[in-house]
Image (spheres, grey):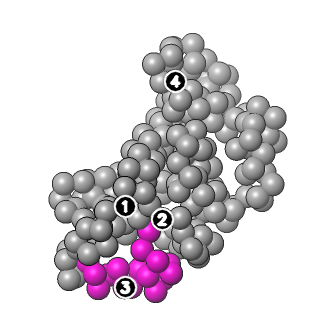
Amino acid sequence: MRLNILKNGHTFLQKLQFRMIKKMMGEVPGPIAVMSYRRQFFGKHFAPWLNKTMRKMKHWTVGEVELMAAFVSKNNECQYCYGDHVEVAKNVYEEKLIMAIMEDINTADIDDKLKAILQFLQKLTVNPSTLTKDDIAPLREAGLSNEAIQEAVQVCGAFSVINRLADAFDFELSSRPAKVARFLFKNGYGMASVKG
């Protein structure tokens, strides 16, 4: 359900900042509107975690993390986040490879570490209650450390939240996806919650 309050329920200072964001990105994405509205309850806390998860990882590249975000969003059936993060991933990967990954990770031409973690994230996203310690064995065989696994799980956690927000608040699909994607790729998610 698209709430009108997310279009006009922000402070004057936030509205000024939204104008700047609109100039840079062509629009104010739905997640920014949600995380900025009454930000002390959610955005103030969630946005730093999102930025850290997506841009301050040690074991994964920005492209790999964006692929994870798109893949989790696809498995959560969130068209909004799926589309946005496929677009961001295109800044690193060819569209043909991204689509191959999204269609079937088992046959996609990707390295063993990325394949293993995506298989794990698929199960974590779709059937988390069925995970056992045996699901960690393929990750170890692929050479993934505890920290690399934890970073990927953080992406899954963050996008499982954002996917639900996107669907609950009926975020509008981007009218300028490539422009938004370039901005997010270059600048990250530090502006996901605008102070008011």
The disc, 2 or 1, on the residue closer to the chain's N-terminal end is: 1
| Neighbour tally class for label 4: few under 14, some 14-19, many 20 plus, Cα within 10 Å | few
The disc, 3 or 1, on the residue closer to the chain's N-terminal end is: 1
Please give the label number shown on residue 127: 4
Residue type of the residue flagged with mark 2? Glu
The disc, 4 or 3, on the residue closer to the chain's N-terminal end is: 3
The disc, 1 or 4, on the residue closer to the chain's N-terminal end is: 1
Q: Residue at x 46, y 86 (%)?
A: 23
- Nearer the observer: mark 3 or 2; the answer is 2
Q: Is residue 60 above or below residue 33?
A: above
Please give the label number shown on residue 19: 3
Q: Residue at x 75, y 37 (%)?
A: 104
Q: Residue at x 64, y 57 (%)?
A: 86
| Neighbour tally class for label 1: few under 14, some 14-19, many 20 plus, Cα within 10 Å | some
- Nearer the observer: mark 3 or 1; the answer is 1
* Distance Cα–Cα, label 3 vs label 2: 18 Å
Residue type of the residue flagged with mark 3? Arg
Q: Is residue 80 visible?
A: yes
Q: Position of residue 78 (x, y in %)?
A: 53, 48
Q: Residue at x 67, y 65 (%)?
A: 91
Write down the region rendered in magenta.
14-29
* Distance Cα–Cα, label 3 vs label 1: 21 Å
* Residue to which mark 2 is pinned: 172
Please give the label number shown on residue 178: none
Quarter holding residue 4: bottom left
State the residue in front, 104 or 63: 104
State the residue in front, 170 or 39: 170
